[in-house]
Amino acid sequence: MRLGINLGYWGLGMDTDNIAVAQEADRLGYSVCWAAEAYGSDAATVLSFVAAKTERIDVGSAIFQIPARTPAMTAMTAATLDTLSGGRFRLGLGVSGPQVSEGWYGVKFDKPLARTREYVEIIRKAMSRERLVHEGAHWTLPLPGGPGKPIKLTVHPVREHIPLYIAAIGPKNLEQTGEIADGWLGIFFSPEHAALSLDPLTAGRAKTGRTLDGFDLCPTVTIAVGEDIEAGVDSQRSYAALYIGGMGSKEKNFYNQLARRMGYEQAADEIQEKYLAKDYAGAAAAVPHDLIDATSLIGDTARIADRMQAYADAGVTTLTLAPSGFTLDERIQALRTGVEALERAGLA
């Protein structure tokens, strides 16, 4: 099992530290460094900067938001980043959510599965450097009746095939991800509830006559190092409450629905009710200890090694760490503990 690092969002006051974290991950042999975007920093610019400041580690978008860019623009960005990084780019995609898609980008959040499938088809065509022709429900290239003509990508990526990942949570999205992608970006993944994600991913792979062999299962987990387990859990409460309670509307919150499928229906209701009422402390307190502990790496090196073994046994191939801590030293120590735990578990 390989390790990755997730820098999260740029512009939150730890920007200089983020480069130092990426460089330390590079030095330690981490496989990939991911950067995210929502409605602040964009991931492409951050990844360009990280690639310029590192030597070996891959750089990946987790995620490029589908409503933010046309598929052809995403293909251009992926090809450019692969070239600038010397063949180190991984393309992660996701549909985002209704509030960001419609409120920030002005793109209707409808038929996300069909839109994703078509988006990926166009990207793969463009990246193959064939002349781009596409007729679909969401995009038609070239536009009919106008001066447009089929054009092919002028940039030559370093690799013939840039790995394509999709962030998916719901069963239907997971199944499609297994069918059309090279890897999966997960969140709040618990080895004890692995079937919730892996069963639909496996079904999707089977549609094309493949198994999960060679498919990169890449969940992001927070890591909090320390002897005090309760303190480590408490350090993750606000993060979990934000996603389960506040990422989306009451009617459509994918993370809240995931918590329900994991068996935390009552807690999911309480977290969301309090978060939407702006009782953020109450929402954080309502997140169950077991939910955080099951979806994070918390404790000393030995305990984290045991959890890493559980993730590997569940089929995870790249475990992406989101280091907890307010200082650079704390985040660097989390990275080093991750490597020590991986070696202790015999997974390096």
Image (tube, rainbow, N blue to C red):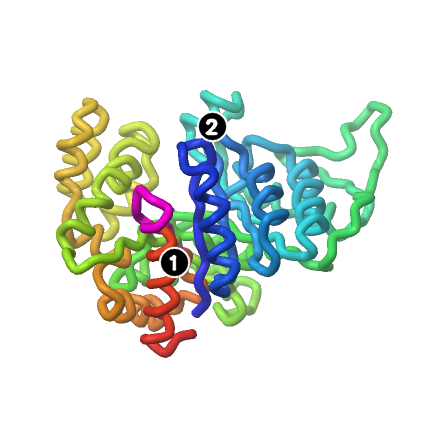
Q: x, y (%) of residue 21?
A: 45, 50
Q: Is residue 132 above or below residue 24?
A: above
Residue 310 pos. (x, y %)? 29, 69
Kindly indicate whether the residue at mark 1 contacts the one at mark 2 (C-beta within 8 angstroms).
no
Look at 30% across and 46% down and name the residue there.
Answer: 325
Asked which secondary structure carries label 2, the reply is loop
- Please, what is the three-letter code of the amino acid marked with disc 2? Tyr
Q: Is residue 173 visible?
A: no
Which residue is labeled 2 in the image? Answer: 39
* Residue placed most toward the observer, 273 or 251: 273
The question of residue 328 being in magenta is answered with: yes
Q: Position of residue 40 (x, y in %)?
A: 47, 28
Label 1: element kind: helix
What distance separates the C-alpha of mark 2 from that of mark 1? 27 Å
Label drawn at residue 335: 1
Determine if the magenta segment contains residue 71: no
In the rendered structure, which disc, 2 or 1, sits on the residue that comes first in sequence? 2
| Magenta part of the chain | 321-330
For the question of whether residue 286 can be seen, the reply is: yes
